Amino acid sequence: MPRPLTVVQLLPAMDSGGVERSTIEIAQALVEAGHRAVVVSARGRLLPELAATGAEHVELGIGRKSLLTLRHVGALRRLFAQAGADIVHARSRLPAWLGWRALQALPPGTRPGFVTTVHGLNSPSRYSAIMVRGERVVCVSDTVREYVLRHYPRTDPGKLRVIPRGIDPAAFPRAPVPDPGARAAAAALHPQLAGHGPLLLLPGRGTRLKGHADALVLLAALREQGLDARLWMPGARDPARAAYVGELEAQADALGISGQVAITPPTTAIAQAYAASELVLQLSRKPEAFGRTVVEALSTGRSVLGWAHGGVGELLRELQPEGAVQAFDAAALHQRAAALLAQPPAQPATMPAALGRYTLKAMQDATLAVYDEFHANRRH
């Protein structure tokens, strides 16, 4: 039996986000497989969840953009040596630079392997190029793989591994459409969502990039044609972005739909929010590396409507082509939304299983296979 591995993951902090979530999920898989998982980051609210996996955490501010951060290179080098690290897995650019420099200071014969994950479509630059220096480079979608090869043409395609982010289907169970109980619960919290017409859901943080304005225009168009549609945007209301929320509220008022829109903080019960809705929107103005909400919504049995670019377009083309609309074509968005609400596309009763490689277990297994493949190659 191969000896257990020690894998050190590097990221800025353990706060909310896809990078942090993936770090925890891989730490859990490592520990369950009998390996040692070490995570290096600043502190963050997800630390208790990380600790519950059995992983170790080392606190270092390796994500702070300051010349003082370079002092952590020595600490990382000592950590890699003392922990007997087999693999260093960097998930963000500055931690990757620090980790890479620390690795160069170790003797080649004892140097851990270097793995990186490209989680986002960062602007191409020498700074971003560190993310393709890994001896194995994990891309979270085919979109990311194509992006890497287009902007870093010297990258060896043979070291790229496409491993999409995954969800636990049990956390997003299929729900009836409509789901009166879930809708009533949502309306009890947000009276604007009460009604007999369809509920549109756009989950996402409060930034212009998430396309909230496009969703408001869509709602106004649907209501103008006689549908008693409502719109819920959990995550859009952020005290730190009060001016942006004010803009959305002013737009809703100008469109005459302010009484049918709920602009709220994030919900901790996102699966129930999906269940309350009839149509989930993914309208990011900037192409995303992946579209986790697409997979989550489809798992619950909900139709998804989104711009056909980036990782969202990739997922929709594969899993629900009827929901893909040419980016920023408002008229086409309205037409497709009306069609999806009138006749939702048939989804197999086994949709969670049909999600295949987009499950959490598939993502964990594929990542551990990269570690094993990488480590096996180094033994020969």
Image (cartoon, rainbow, N blue to C red):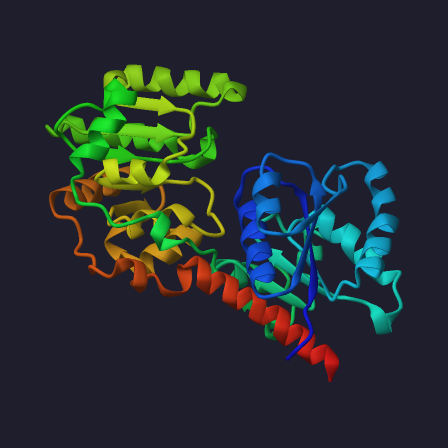
The quadrant of the image that shows the C terminus is: bottom right
Quadrant assignment, res 37? bottom right
- In the image, 132 versus 265, the foreground residue is 265
Residue extending furthest toward the bottom: 380
Left or right: 315, with 199 as reference point: right
The quadrant of the image that shows the N terminus is: bottom right
- For the point 30% across and 58% down, the residue is 352
Quadrant assignment, res 264? top left
- For the point 58% across and 39% down, the residue is 46
- In the image, 10 versus 55, the foreground residue is 55
Residue 229 point in image, percent of width and height: 18, 29
Residue 95 point in image, percent of width and height: 73, 48
Res. 66 visible in picture: yes
- For the point 36% across and 38% down, the residue is 270
Left or right: 190, with 134 as reference point: left
- For the point 24% across and 24% down, the residue is 187
Residue 239 point in image, percent of width and height: 51, 18
Residue 323 point in image, percent of width and height: 26, 50
- In the image, 311 versus 355, the foreground residue is 355
Q: Is residue 162 above or below residue 263?
A: below
